[in-house]
Image: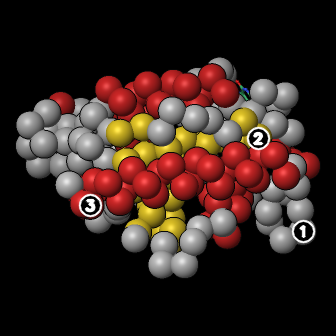
Amino acid sequence: MRLLGVSGSLRRASHNRQLLRAAGMLLPPGVELVEFDGLKTIPPFDEDDEAAPGTSVQAWRRAIEGADAILFATPEYNSSIPGQLKNAIDWASRPAAHPALRNKPVAVIGASTGMFGAVWSQAELRKALAAAGARVVDRELPVASADEAFDEHGQLKDRDLMLELSGILAELLDNAELRLAA
Ligand SMILES: Cc1cc2nc3c(=O)[nH]c(=O)nc-3n(C[C@H](O)[C@H](O)[C@H](O)COP(=O)(O)O)c2cc1C
């Protein structure tokens, strides 16, 4: 089983990248987490380019199509989704006849340095993913005060958050198995 990890933050030392890695440590044997690293190279969505999208968009769509499920970890920028992530979702919601995200099992988690753990951004991302046709796990993981949330092994310090993350992963993998069986 192949899980694609997508961080909505581009920066190297991102807490959301860290959160994806923490999720990777909780996966059962036989499931691999592969991080998508090309978000920054995806150009602004332009309907005029839809007929012949560039290589970065093709790579993004291929990464989605090759994954059994996708785990998004998003920060919150001004109470919303980072622009580069929304832009990538827009590309993956097209072409309308066969969008890459259609029926794809996805889940959303998120970390912010503030008190609320990117909950608004997670809610908006779930909404956009559902609009693009993905099968979205209806749960969230609000990791607040992200600069203090991880231990020296890169795992979440808060046991309840870790249990919730395990639950989200289990539901996501169940959805992926159901889809494979269908
Ligand atoms: C442009 C910008 C806007 C931000 N807006 C919010 C916000 O609305 N809510 C919040 O909790 N944190 C906000 N933050 C702080 C982020 O939570 C913090 O920078 C976080 O570490 C970003 O995630 P990352 O570590 O994965 O890059 C903002 C940060 C930036 C750079």
The residue lying at 14 percent from left, 38 percent from top is: 95
Q: Secondary structure at mark 1?
A: loop
Q: Nearer the viewer, residue 44 or 114?
A: 114
Looking at the rendered structure, the kind of residue marked 2 is Val
Cβ of mark 1 under 8 Å from ligand 1: the answer is: no
Q: Nearer the viewer, residue 65 or 139?
A: 139
Residue annotated with mark 3: 180
The residue lying at 48 percent from left, 39 percent from top is: 137
User: In which image quadrant can residue 134 be found?
Assistant: top left
Tell me how far mark 3 sits from mark 1, CA to CA. 36 Å
Q: On the rendered image, what quadrant is the N terminus found in?
A: bottom left
Quadrant assignment for ligand 1? top right
Estimate the x, y position of residue 179 in percent, counting from the top left. Answer: 28, 54
The numbered dot on residue 152 is 1
User: In which image quadrant can residue 135 be found?
Assistant: top left
Q: Nearer the viewer, residue 176 or 19?
A: 176
Estimate the x, y position of residue 16 in percent, counting from the top left. Answer: 67, 50
Residue annotated with mark 2: 143
Q: Is residue 35 above or below residue 144?
A: below
Estimate the x, y position of residue 7 in percent, counting from the top left. Answer: 56, 51
Work out whether mark 3 precedes mark 1 in sequence or the reverse, and give the earlier one.
1
Q: In the displayed structure, does residue 164 sit left or right of residue 131?
A: right
Work out whether mark 3 precedes mark 2 in sequence or the reverse, and give the earlier one.
2
The residue lying at 63 percent from left, 23 percent from top is: 120
Q: In the displayed structure, does residue 30 sit left or right of residue 87?
A: right
Q: Is residue 8 above or below residue 27?
A: above
Q: Is residue 41 visible?
A: no
Cβ of mark 2 under 8 Å from ligand 1: the answer is: no
Q: Nearer the viewer, residue 78 or 153?
A: 153
Q: Secondary structure at mark 3?
A: helix
